[in-house]
Amino acid sequence: MTRTDKLTKLIAVFDQFHGAIEALDDPLAKRLAANWTEIRSNYLAPTKAPRSAYAAGMEQGLRETPLLLGSMPPPARKAAAEALAVAIAAHYPEFLLKDAAQLERIKVHGSIRGEREFYLVRHHLDILEGDPMRKQELQQWYELVDRFESRGTKISP
């Protein structure tokens, strides 16, 4: 069995994610999907930098994708967040494991310690919202978000 490199995994994640959100009735989702179609070829056979550099940039883009989804109306944002989670689980599950470990650390220390953690929690909430079995967990996460926001911390748009 051959090992798939990180760049190949990330391309597969973005392919599946953008394919899914393209079907949403949301102008931002359609713009994101069209943008991916335009730039995808740049990642297939990178020549200007090592594959690992492209993978690092794409991984950062993957981390920031929930920020982009934040301006969508709640139903589209939830569908897009779910599509992102499904694509990551299918092609790059170790990314989810890292995020799960980070979420657990946030829960253990009982606070959100910065913008990156805030957006990780916000994305997690987008996935959990609407699941009646997770109301108590949602409430705990909402409390952490409220405490973070009450500190007056500026969040980049």
Image (tube, rainbow, N blue to C red):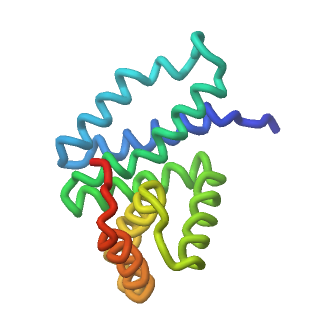
Quarter of the figure that contains the N terminus: top right
Front-most of residues 63 and 88 = 63
Q: Position of residue 86 (x, y in %)?
A: 48, 55
Q: Position of residue 151 (x, y in %)?
A: 34, 70
Question: What residue sits 31% from the left and 46% below the top?
Answer: 68
Question: What residue sits 58% from the left and 57% below the top?
Answer: 96
Q: Position of residue 144 (x, y in %)?
A: 41, 77
Q: Position of residue 120 (x, y in %)?
A: 46, 60
Instruction: Name the outermost residue toward the right.
Output: 1
Instruction: Name the outermost residue toward the bottom.
Output: 136
In this view, 54 is above or below 60: above
- Horizontal side, residue 114 vs residue 26: left or right: right
Task: State the count of labels.
Answer: 0
- Horizontal side, residue 65 vs residue 109: left or right: left
Front-most of residues 38 and 148 = 148
In this view, 122 is above or below 104: above
- Tell me the quarter of the picture where residue 101 sits: bottom right
Question: What residue sits 38% from the left and 69% below the top?
Answer: 125
- Tell me the quarter of the picture where residue 49 sits: top right
- Horizontal side, residue 83 vs residue 31: left or right: right
Question: What residue sits 42% from the left and 56% below the top?
Answer: 115
